[in-house]
Amino acid sequence: MRILVVGASGDIGRAAVAALRGRGHEVVAAHRTAPDHPVDLGDRGSVARLLTSVGRADAVVSAVGGTPFGPWESMDREKWMAGLEGKLLGQIMLVQQAREIVPVGGSFTLVSGVLSDQPVRGGSVSSAINAAIEAWVRSTALELWGEHRINVVSPTVLAGSRERYDAAFPGFPSVDDHAVGQAFVRSVESGETGLVYRP
């Protein structure tokens, strides 16, 4: 399959790319600073240019996901909007725009995160946005039934980035990067839809 991976340069994106290429898929890697396929999900024009350059994809994977982190009382409207536009609306708009390059039977895989159901101090924005993504995917699977499939991967802290996030996720078990990549493989290859994978 020809698979577009958006957010391919991050920890989760690299895990997805490695796993999908390991299965023999052709992966088109896109991210903000990609030389061949740059994209900013907050810019519809940027997304449109990416999709035009890609032309066709059997599946689209999104591994984007930065959200503001800090005490809930410090999360003003600007910080909320940054998270909403970047991770939530960015992924939703990607699906809406990318439908035109994905044939019937193709799939979309988005990313949320463990904070959707295991909150931590300072993660109020991320918790809300991750939960919203998962709810949207379940609902949209009904809308796309018979046309496209859609799932979401909700990983905990990746083992490869444990040190960077340990202070924010005290006591949380980490997950092997390979296991996260396999969740994306399952979404792309399994035929399932409307699911939240929690590797």
Image (tube, rainbow, N blue to C red):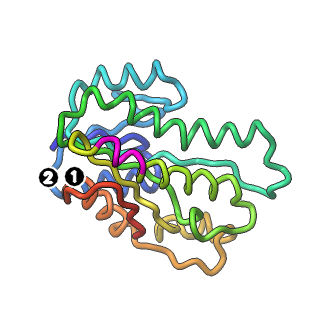
Residue drawn at x 15%, y 44% as measured from the top left = 1
> How far across and down, in percent of the image, does residue 196 sit?
40, 61
> How far across and down, in percent of the image, does residue 125 sit?
68, 52
- Residue range in magenta is 139-144
- Main SS, magenta region, reads helix
Location of residue 53 (image quadrant):
top left
Return the residue nearer the eye: 46 or 17.
46
Distance CA(mark 2)–CA(mark 1): 5 Å
- The three-letter amino acid code for the residue at tag 2 is Gly
Q: Are marks 2 and 1 in contact (CB under 8 Å)?
A: yes
Return the residue nearer the eye: 38 or 119.
119
Q: Callout 1 environment at 10 Å: few (<14), some (14 to 19), or many (20+)?
A: some
Quadrant containing the C terminus is bottom left
169 vs 37, left or right, is right
Numbered circle sitting on residue 165: none
Q: Is residue 28 above or below residue 52?
A: below
Q: Is residue 196 shown in magenta?
A: no
- The three-letter amino acid code for the residue at tag 1 is Arg
Residue position marked by numbered label 2 in the rendering: 24
Residue position marked by numbered label 1 in the rendering: 21
> How far across and down, in percent of the image, does residue 137 sit?
42, 50
Q: Is residue 185 above or below residue 48?
A: below
Location of residue 36 (image quadrant):
top left
- Farthest-out residue, right: 73
10 vs 81, left or right, is left
Residue drawn at x 42%, y 26% as measured from the top left = 47
SS under mark 2: loop
> How far across and down, in percent of the image, does residue 43 sit?
52, 24
Residue drawn at x 30%, y 41% as measured from the top left = 144
